[in-house]
């Protein structure tokens, strides 16, 4: 998970890493209380996490609000909106947008230097030509959420169930998009790591 990787990275002296999407506040969390430990980790561990937003199956508005409440800055890399994982846009603003790795690295370094103790979330949207078509995304997400409610899926089983149902409904398109955004996140994280490395 992101939380465990953040812990390991910090103790190994690694300031940045890439993932697909973070966990967050689940839909209907007001009933289930289901909130990912990733948010807690971001509020306590000073590591920069490059991601394509939070998993689309989550409650994105509440997730972004929780990040703000926890004092975790959300930096958009060449985007003004928090990504929706399979899609580039969610309609939710990021805290600040950076167009270059160097500018973003300076902001990340400044945040860590302040010593607040929180992580930084780097919102890096899936490449435009790799994102899932909107109609397919909307239909698949709706069907997956409806299936979870009908089958009474709860707790830790929710995320793998929804992701697998998305795979089925999209005919594997969600997996292709997932791999594309992972590669993109890895590229940006690698460049950010180089920019954050101390110079002799």
Image (cartoon, rainbow, N blue to C red):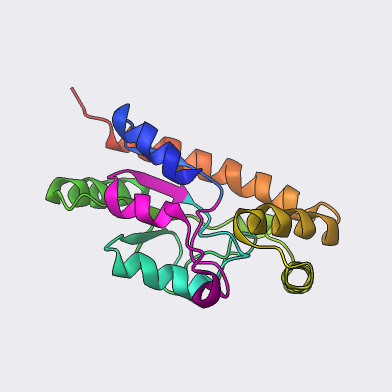
Residue 26 image point, x, y percent: 55, 67
Instruction: Answer with left or right where residue 123 lies relative to residue 75.
Output: right
Residue 67 image point, x, y percent: 36, 65
From this view, report whether residue 24 is shown above or below residue 101. Answer: below
Instruction: Answer with left or right where residue 115 lies relative to residue 137.
Output: left
Q: Is residue 104 magenta?
A: no
Which quadrant, please, contains the C terminus? top left
Residue 125 image point, x, y percent: 54, 58
Instruction: Answer with left or right where residue 78 lies relative to residue 194.
Output: right
Query: What span is colored magenta in the figure?
Result: 21-50
From this view, report whether residue 42 is shown above or below residue 88. Answer: above
Q: Nearer the viewer, residue 83 or 78?
A: 83
Q: Is residue 22 magenta?
A: yes
Residue sitting farthest toward the left: 114
From this view, report whether residue 66 is shown above or below residue 99. Answer: below
Instruction: Answer with left or right where residue 19 lies relative to residue 171.
Output: left
Residue 167 image point, x, y percent: 79, 54
């Amino acid at each position: 998970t992101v939380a465990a990787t953040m812990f390991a990275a910090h103790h190994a002296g690694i300031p940045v890493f890439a993932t697909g999407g973070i966990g967050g506040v689940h839909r209907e969390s007001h009933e289930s209380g289901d909130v990912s430990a990733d948010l807690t980790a971001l509020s306590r561990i000073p590591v920069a996490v490059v991601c394509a937003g939070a998993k689309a199956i989550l409650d994105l508005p509440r997730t972004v609000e929780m990040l703000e409440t926890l004092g975790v800055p959300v930096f958009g890399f060449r985007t003004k909106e928090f990504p929706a994982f399979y899609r580039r846009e969610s309609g939710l603003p990021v805290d600040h947008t950076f167009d270059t790795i160097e500018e973003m690295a300076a902001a990340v370094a400044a945040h860590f230097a302040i010593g607040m103790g929180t992580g930084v979330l780097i919102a890096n949207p899936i490449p435009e030509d790799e994102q899932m078509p909107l109609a397919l995304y909307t239909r698949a997400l709706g069907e997956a959420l409806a299936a979870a409610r009908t089958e009474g899926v709860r707790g830790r089983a929710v995320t793998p169930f929804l992701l697998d149902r998305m795979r089925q409904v999209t005919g594997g398109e969600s997996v292709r998009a997932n791999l594309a955004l992972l590669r993109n996140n890895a590229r940006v994280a690698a460049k950010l790591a180089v920019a954050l490395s101390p110079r002799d």
